[in-house]
Image (tube, rainbow, N blue to C red):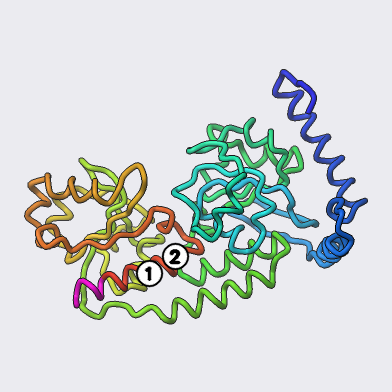
Amino acid sequence: MPILKSPRARRSWFAGALAVGALALAACGGGASADPNASASEEQAAADYAAFTADNCGTDVAVDAAPQRIVTIKSSTTELVLALGAGDRIVGTAYPDGPVPDEYADVMADVPVLSDRVPSHEAVLELEPDLVYAGWESNLAADGAGERSSFSSLGITTFVSPSACQEPGYQPDPLTFDDVFAEIEQVGALLGEPDAAADLVEEQRAALSDVTPSDAGLSAVWYSSGSDTPFVGAGIGAPQMVMDAAGLENIAADVHDTWTSLSWEAVADAEPDVIVLVDSEWNTAENKIEVLESNPVTAALPAVQDARYVVVPFAATEAGVRSVDAARTIADQLADLEG
């Protein structure tokens, strides 16, 4: 890349580079390859790509060739691309919620992590992506990775996880597993991997049908973060969806939101039978137990005194390919508690 000092010059160069790259891809059938069989396969894949259009959280998306240089923001998007077999097209990632599952570790070993939080616009553009796939709408904002219109003006497609759409008419209300499976199919179509998406959905539906929810009538709070005021799963998002599948009654189910802040006094009044602890590197389940046991309001709760905890990794707490497994592992832990 030439040395371009100003952002304007860099953006112009990237736009030109992308245009040249697109022409090169068209001329070479998706990129030069020393393997004639691989080249033929790539050409066939390009010929088979069905033009993709979508109204994505209120933004029109139109793509006529499978994205080849993908930047993902948030673990849920990274892991869906990986699960669809397109991990070799990820050129950068950001805002990981935790390590990828072991089966993808090798694929991601050399993929640069642009930031532990939302990457800068410049950092994303440096990778010359043709697709930026974000887990939250707020990831693609002027104070984040950049506005969608800015990427669009450079010929870069953006796509936001539909489960994270915020505007009425777009926000799933409530989120369901059918919404999660629909996103898998939609992203499969976007990436030119519809068969992989169909197989993945079939696999996920089968796994969901194998989840045995608790029938003990247990109530629970989904404790995500916070010490003075806990941030918990509310009534229309992924935590509610997963708790429903595991057979738990959410004490914050009547809060019409995906997440909410709830006082410890309100948690104590609800007296949940079980506490779901979200485990992350920066706020572990052990730390949360210390908070619960050191706060006199919660220390007296039977769930705390009896250590009736179930743990779910942070990366599995947002809608995605880990949602079914989150329900399964919670149901299994409940069975152990009741056993």
The picture places residue 81, in percent across and down from the top left corner, at 61, 58
Residue 301 is left or right of residue 87, and the answer is: left
**In the picture, which quadrant includes the C terminus?**
bottom left
Instruction: Identify the residue under disc 2.
Output: 323
**In the picture, which quadrant includes the N terminus?**
top right
Amino acid tagged 2:
Ser
The picture places residue 309, in percent across and down from the top left corner, at 22, 61
Q: How many marks?
A: 2
Q: Are the residues at dot 1 and dot 2 in contact (C-beta closer than 8 Å)?
A: yes
Q: Is residue 227 above or below residue 235?
A: above
Q: Secondary structure at mark 1?
A: helix
Q: Is residue 48 magenta?
A: no
Q: Nearer the viewer, residue 46 or 173?
A: 46
Residue name at image x 30 percent, y 58 percent: 255
Residue name at image x 71 percent, y 43 percent: 129
Q: Mark on residue 327? A: 1
Would residue 20 be seen by someone viewing this image from the given angle?
yes
Q: Residue furthest right?
A: 27
The picture places residue 108, in percent across and down from the top left corner, at 59, 50
Q: Secondary structure at mark 2?
A: helix
Q: Which residues are magenta?
A: 334-339
Would residue 77 be seen by someone viewing this image from the given angle?
no
